[in-house]
Amino acid sequence: MRSAIDIENLTVRYQGKTALHDVNVSLPVASICGLVGMNGAGKSTLFKAIMNAVPTVSGKVRLEGHTVKTAQKRGLVAYVPQTESVDWNFPVSVRDVVMMGRYGFMNPLRRPKAADHELVDQALARVHLTDFQDRQVGQLSGGQRKRVFVARALAQGATILLLDEPFAGVDAKTEASLVDLLKELQGQGITTLIAAHDLATIGSYCDHIILLKGEVIAAGPTKQVFTEENIAKTYDSVFGVKGGVPWM
Amino acid sequence: MDVIIAPLQYDFMLKAIVVSSLVGVVCALLSCFLVLKRWSMMGEAVSHSVLPGVVLAYLFSVPYSIGAFLFGLGGVLGIGFIKQRVRLKDDAAIGIVYTTLFALGLVLVSKIPSNIDLMHILFGYVLGISNADAWQVGIIAVAVSALLYGLRRSLLLYSFDPAHASAIRLNVNFYHYLLLTLLALTVVASVQTVGIVLVVAMLITPGAIAHLLTDRFDHMLLIAVAASVSSTIAGAYASYYFDVSTGGAMVLVLGAIFLLTFLFAPKYGVINQVGR
């Protein structure tokens, strides 16, 4: 099976501490994978490593067989930010934000061509936001706000989506409709990696799970690795672990 | 009509109107980015930091714009350096650096014999601007305006979502320093019009007015320019007819436009928000 994300022996030191230690993960194309762990377990750092936003001590990351740099140049990987990390008062419309997915393929003037507009149309249709394209982004519901960024990723031609806590503060109905969307995209060959610290529902729609606690506790198909024992290890108090913790 | 045209037969007045308008345009364009990026304090920092540069430029007989630019940019680089190296946050680093540089400027002015009029630097003196200075200001204002407008989409993306910007390999550092450089240049261009104290208003208020009136970024730029240019021109006339401080009059008009917008903006004004 071809890998969408391939991480080998990845170690990252961040602000003087080892944030990730010897991570090995391989995710097949078109999987929906949950990345679970406590706050500070290294979920964001792993995202940053996949986005080339932190220097790594050792190890390598391959996306669809490419280096991160090449994958980024081709727009293969996209990040859907946490809701609170975006200023929703910005004077930008839904369409403006989705068009930003095309900016990587333009010169610094970022003047969209007909082909760019067409890809934006398609992306809006795929996330069912065509009717909302002229709205200012702040005038969207929580679920729609997530969809805008998914659409931006699609317009960019991304095949790997990184979602950072997408379900924080959204109701069950919104969560279900977002999951439906991700499954639709899965059918189109898109791989999704979802960071979450809430375990309540993640096992029900992820086919793969990575349990993270500074290092990988377990990673693989949900049925095999999402066990009570592994969850206990992941969420155990850092100070209660026998024999100390290797990365502290 | 005569009230408008009559003053224009004087060279100094015509020059003042043209220079003020160009400065109004560049400040307005920049203010949109500063307001959205929450960089208002940065504008204040750069403007106050240029003072020693102006005095030293006089001492070494180089154009004041070079000295002002170097100190303005040096100020923000210093702020960035402090923030990175120790645990102080933005506001503390900004507050320390610009007040210190401003103080250095004051000490230099009082000690170095020169014909620099401190009041003119602090509060502007556009009616007395020399031809050489008018050209300098004009060229800087036009060039910076062109860059801000041409690169507006890149700068907006950098401001809105730097994580996405760097993910698509847009050089975020480049745009960061570009915006700072353009800020320093804008302050340099504004010194003689409104002065380094009042330029802060020109760097914030037009963008703030426009932000309350529209949800489209291109419209925001247009509205900011309209508000800013009309205030600079109104200020120049007020100063001509009533013999009041030019920079002061410009900023007062701008403040009045802000007040009206704050109250009556259709969607985001306070009065209409109470109604909902």
Image: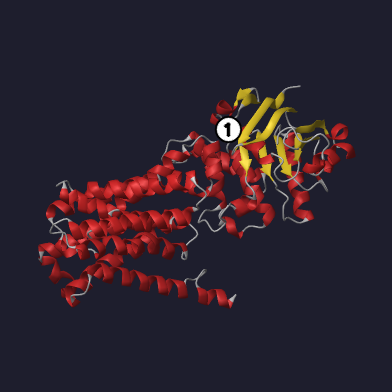
Name which quarter of the figure residue A170 lies in: bottom right
Please indicate whether residue A186 sits to the left or right of residue A229 in the image.
left
Name the colour scheme. Answer: secondary structure
Label 1: few (<14), some or many (≥20) within 10 Å?
Answer: some
**Count of numbered marks:** 1
Identify the residue at image location x=22%, y=56%.
B108
If the image is split into quadrants, where does the N terminus of chain A sit? top right
Between A219 and A41, the one nearer to me in the picture: A41
Residue A213 coordinates in the image, percent (x, y): 75, 38
Work out whether residue A218 or residue B266 is closer to the camera in this orientation and state it: A218
User: Where does the C terminus of chain A fall, quadrant-wise?
Assistant: top right
Q: Chain of mark 1?
A: A
Disc 1 secondary structure class: loop
Coordinates of residue B11 in the picture (x, y in percent): 10, 62
Q: Nearer the viewer, residue A110 or A171?
A: A171
Compared with B191, B67 (above or below) is above
Residue A11 appears in view:
yes
Residue B32 visible in rendering: no
- Taking depth in this image into account, of B270 and A97 the one nearest to the observer is B270
Q: Residue A192: horizontal and vertical position, in percent?
A: 71, 37
Name the amino acid type tagged 1.
Answer: Asn
Q: Residue at x 48, y 49 (%)?
A: B159
Q: Residue lying furthest left in this view?
A: B10
List x then y, in percent, for residue B245.
Answer: 22, 71
User: Would you name the residue on which mark 1 appears?
Assistant: A52
Give the side of residue A245 with respect to residue B7, left or right: right
Q: Residue furthest right?
A: A228
When the figure is inspected, residue A225 is found, relative to residue B99, above or below; the finding is: above
In the shown orientation, is residue B199 left or right of residue A93? left
